Image (cartoon, grey):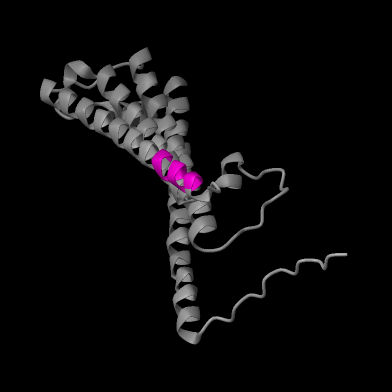
Amino acid sequence: MSEPILPKERQKLTPLNNLIFMSRWLQLPLYLGLILAQCVYVFHFWVELKDLIGAVLGNEAALQHIFEAVTVPGARQATKLNEATIMLVVLGLIDVVMISNLLIMVIVGGYETFVSRMHLEGHPDQPEWLSHVNASVLKTKLAMAIIGISSIHLLKTFINANAYDPKVLIAQTVIHIVFLLSALAIAYTDRIMIGTQNQSKTPH
């Protein structure tokens, strides 16, 4: 009868190696700062939503704030709440939500990848993507989130296209295309790296 295979004994780290490894905790204040930034976005979201509801109900101060928020500098300010104005405000709210999602991915995924495991296995609210997160997956998901945010900004610009110089429209479109190509390049590079790793693990 074969003897059970015991887990490999963990090698004790030297003081220098332990110091270098413990330096990862220096990132903790950065992630705590991003949590505070998330709180700022939540507050901003509710301020904008309150103004939108107030404008719909006829509050003049809220209506004026909405017009100032969505009017392009140099363009004529609207005088009444219309579909385009409401759409611009809603797109702004969606933009805040998408940036908040990006913050969550950076905070949770970055902490799990670079600082310490959170041991969320089996937790009912564990994000689906967190179960297989690594640096490559995190880069790809962040790139996709940035593309989504860029799309919202581009759509807001197109709704107000008559208030922008054509050069601005072209520049924003080119920047969005660059984001798309960058995300494709990141995904393609990761695919090549994964394929290379799989080939190296395949027995000859």
Q: Nearer the viewer, residue 163 or 122?
A: 122
Task: Name which residue lies at 33% across and 31% down.
Answer: 65
Q: Is residue 192 magenta?
A: yes
Q: Give percent across and percent down for residue 93.
A: 43, 31
**First to last magenta residue range:** 191-199
The image quarter in which residue 181 lies: top left
Q: Give percent across and percent down for residue 75.
A: 17, 23
Q: Is residue 119 left or right of residue 14?
A: right
Q: Compared with residue 132, is residue 10 higher up or lower down, i.e. above or below?
A: below
Please state the total of marks drawn on the protein image: 0
Q: Is residue 116 magenta?
A: no
* Prevailing secondary structure of the magenta residues: helix
Task: Name which residue lies at 46% across and 69% down.
Answer: 24
Q: Nearer the viewer, residue 9 or 160?
A: 9
Q: Does the rendering let one see residue 107?
A: yes
Q: Give percent across and percent down for residue 104.
A: 50, 46
Q: Nearer the viewer, residue 195 or 98?
A: 195
